[in-house]
């Protein structure tokens, strides 16, 4: 296992920007929300020129808005991607390769290996992204996980559900952002959901989808994540999840307030999971549920957390996880010591619709949210007049509010208030066509 060097150094770069002969940091695709833009910003602050390699750069509006250098290439075609990288290397030194997207972390790791640069084990990342292989590895290493089965057809899934004797969670073995994750309470629901998952031959990025699903026991304990960097836990995050049958993340609190025994169990399970999977370079986002005082690993993501968690960690602790990931990719030491001016705690709540709704006065809603003490950021992602449906996964979130303050209980209360009495006022029920007014 390759361990990222963690030092007590200042965790910011010089912020002088790249020079004319700056080395390149290759960014293979990006996530569509959250930290994608920040990866490029941190690269520039560290004196490197970010270069986005993407099949369709227009998928990421920030690239054009920020004047990001882009190379159009089929990132699913290994030969084409390598040819593009070789062409770049003919004119400039390539110093690192990264991806902020779940779907391309293994591709970026492969590039880093071929270039002789810093990065995680591509084989470990690839195996980790397959949740069935991940679960088998963790169970074999004695890391607590839910009971589970892997199924390749409806009959196998139904047999798995019967053996687990209760409601089960059915999910694709690859994916991100709760896509395709669903609670199934009986055989009919299992069969219907499995048929839908197995009918998809490609995922939402157009990449080939494996023809198997994961069927696991439904754990009802509280959900958390542990953000790991290298082989050390940075912080534990309390997660808020919407009502079943879907599992949309509706908020986070940093740091989580927990009894010492449970806090230790979460960190122990998370670090053991990262070690068992052969990771230990850069960031890993480990999701867990408490089962009594046992912390069971739901999944390990070999990348930074989504859901604006890195931004919460920066505001609460003064630790810049995005910058740390960029510096690690560039081969430098990584400083994860917090800053003295950090708030101490931070929370986020996401705006979702309980029923089909239309966004009305977005500006007034944002202003009302910002009027709540402790609010440091708020946004609605879509313009007024947009009709929105109840969220099935992260794509159904239509806004957020972030708060910062001295303690997690205060920031959580402020975020709840700003969401309910601020952002949520932007949602109005859709009146069916022809209904009386």
Image (spheres, rainbow, N blue to C red):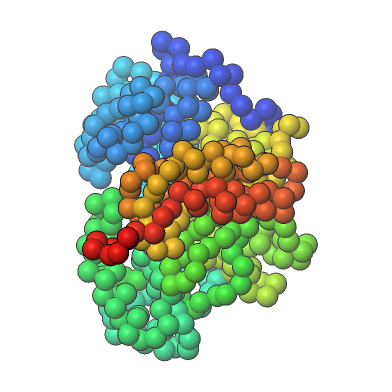
Instruction: Between residue 342 and residue 7, name the one nearer to us.
Output: 342
Q: Which residue is drawn at 59% across and 19% down?
A: 14
Outermost residue to the front:
437
Q: How many labels does the image show?
A: 0
Q: In this view, does 44 lie above or below 236?
A: above
Q: Identify the residue at horizontal 52%, vertical 57% (top origin).
A: 250
| Residue 53 to residue 160: above or below | above
Between 370 and 244, the one lying in front of the other is: 370
User: Does residue 370 appear to the left or right of 157 in the view shown?
Assistant: right
261 with respect to 310 (left or right): right
User: In the depicted view, which residue is nearer to us: 279 or 424?
Assistant: 424
- Which quadrant, please, contains the C terminus? bottom left
**Image position, residue 432 (x, y; %):** 28, 63
Residue 7 on image: x %, y %? 68, 34
Furthest toward the top, the residue is 20
Image position, residue 103 (x, y; %): 36, 49
Is residue 275 shown left or right of residue 262?
left
Q: Is residue 266 visible in the rendered structure shown here?
A: yes
Q: Can residue 302 be seen in this view?
A: no
Q: Which residue is drawn at 35% across and 86% down?
A: 187
User: Residue 203: x, y in percent?
Assistant: 28, 57
Q: Is residue 119 above or below residue 252?
A: above
Which quarter of the figure has residue 372? top right
Q: Which of the 4 image quarters holds residue 210?
A: bottom left
């Amino acid at each position: 296992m390759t361990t990222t060097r963690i030092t007590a150094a200042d965790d910011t770069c010089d912020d002088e920007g790249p020079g004319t002969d700056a080395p390149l940091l290759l960014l293979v695709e990006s996530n569509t929300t959250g930290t994608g833009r920040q990866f490029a910003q941190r690269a520039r602050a560290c004196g490197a020129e970010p270069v986005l390699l993407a099949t369709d750069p227009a998928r990421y509006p920030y690239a054009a808005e920020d004047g990001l250098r882009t190379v159009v290439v089929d990132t699913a075609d290994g030969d084409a991607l390598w040819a593009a990288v070789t062409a770049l290397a003919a004119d400039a030194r390539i110093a690192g390769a990264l991806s902020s997207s779940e779907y391309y972390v293994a591709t970026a790791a492969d590039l880093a290996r071929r270039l002789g640069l810093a990065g995680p084990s591509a084989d470990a990342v690839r195996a980790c992204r397959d949740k069935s292989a991940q679960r088998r590895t963790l169970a074999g290493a004695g890391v607590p996980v839910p009971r589970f089965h892997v199924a390749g057809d409806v009959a196998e899934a139904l047999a798995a559900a019967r053996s687990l004797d209760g409601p089960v969670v059915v999910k694709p073995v690859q994916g991100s952002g709760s896509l395709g994750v669903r609670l199934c309470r009986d055989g009919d629901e299992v069969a219907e959901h499995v048929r839908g998952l197995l009918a998809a031959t490609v995922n939402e990025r157009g990449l080939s989808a494996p023809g198997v699903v994961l069927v696991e026991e439904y754990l009802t304990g509280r959900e958390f994540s542990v953000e790991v960097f290298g082989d050390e836990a940075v912080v534990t995050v309390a997660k808020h999840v919407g009502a079943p049958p879907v599992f949309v993340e509706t908020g986070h609190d940093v740091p989580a307030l927990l009894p010492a025994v449970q806090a230790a169990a979460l960190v122990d399970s998370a670090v053991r999971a990262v070690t068992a999977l052969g990771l230990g370079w850069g960031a890993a986002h480990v999701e867990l549920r408490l089962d009594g005082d046992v912390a069971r690993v739901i999944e390990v993501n070999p990348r930074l957390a989504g859901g604006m968690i890195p931004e919460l960690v920066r505001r609460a602790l003064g630790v810049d996880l995005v910058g740390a990931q960029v510096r690690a990719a560039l081969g430098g030491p990584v400083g994860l010591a917090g800053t003295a001016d950090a708030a101490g705690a931070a929370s986020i709540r996401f705006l979702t619709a309980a029923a089909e709704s239309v966004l009305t006065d977005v500006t007034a809603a944002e202003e009302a949210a910002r009027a709540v003490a402790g609010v440091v950021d708020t946004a609605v992602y879509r313009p007024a007049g947009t009709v929105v449906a109840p969220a099935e996964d992260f794509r159904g979130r239509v806004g957020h509010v972030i708060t910062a303050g001295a303690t997690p209980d205060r920031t959580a209360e402020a975020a709840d208030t700003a969401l309910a009495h601020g952002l949520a006022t932007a949602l109005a029920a859709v009146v069916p066509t022809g209904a009386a007014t």
